[in-house]
Image (spheres, rainbow, N blue to C red):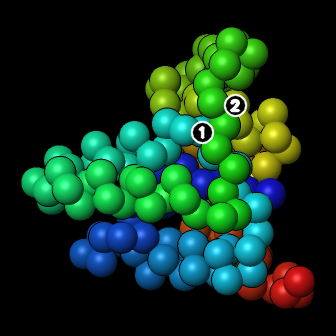
Amino acid sequence: MLTIDASVWVNADSPSEAGHADSRALLDLVFARRWPVIVPTLLAIEVAGVIARTRSDAVLAEDMAIAMLALPTVRWVVLDEALARRGVELAARHRLRGADSVYAAVALVHRCELISLDNEHLTRLPPVIPTFTPADALHRLQSLPAT
């Protein structure tokens, strides 16, 4: 199972950004093979905010976020008290920003690999959560048999 950070989702939809092709190919592979993705509900909000800010298009931002909420293989996790406590622990112990600790908590609690472009995820979490860039995850996942 995978937890995919907002940085990857936005990068996959941003052709001018470095790493775009890997992020796009990763999401395409994950959904083509119908692998389960477990993410916080925060993801839709973050994507809407980034798209609205970077593209100055509120309608596009809302449409993208609503479409994400309807993806069939995505399980949306609500930030309840137990998950918040785990996020607090991860934020404090690994010096993570708030939203980053929520993705980490979801990955840890649900035993997912975390896929991110966030340097703090990539450098601080590997001792406790399997954490990969989209390129590394893509390379690894492409070698798995299709189900």
Asked whether the beta carbons under mark 1 and mark 2 sit within 8 Å of each other, the answer is yes
Question: Quick check: 72 above or below 111?
Answer: below
In the picture, which quadrant includes the N terminus? bottom right
Question: Quick check: 105 above or below 1?
Answer: above
* Relative horizontal placement of residue 87, taking residue 67 as reference (left or right): right
The residue mark sitting in front, 1 or 2, is 1
x 60%, y 39%: residue: 40
Q: Can you give x and y, in whole percent of width and height, for residue 36 in the image?
A: 76, 61
Identified by mark 1, the residue type is Pro
x 66%, y 19%: residue: 80
The CA distance from mark 1 to mark 2 is 9 Å
* Relative horizontal placement of residue 52, taking residue 100 as reference (left or right): left
Residue hosting label 1: 40
Q: Can you give x and y, in whole percent of width and height, for residue 111 in the image?
A: 85, 44
Q: Nearer the viewer, residue 126 or 28?
A: 28
Count residues near mark 2 (Cα–Cα under 10 Å), then give few for <14, some for 14-19, many for 20+: many
Identified by mark 2, the residue type is Ala
Q: Can you give x and y, in whole percent of width and height, for residue 119 in the image?
A: 50, 46
Q: Which mark is residue 105?
A: 2
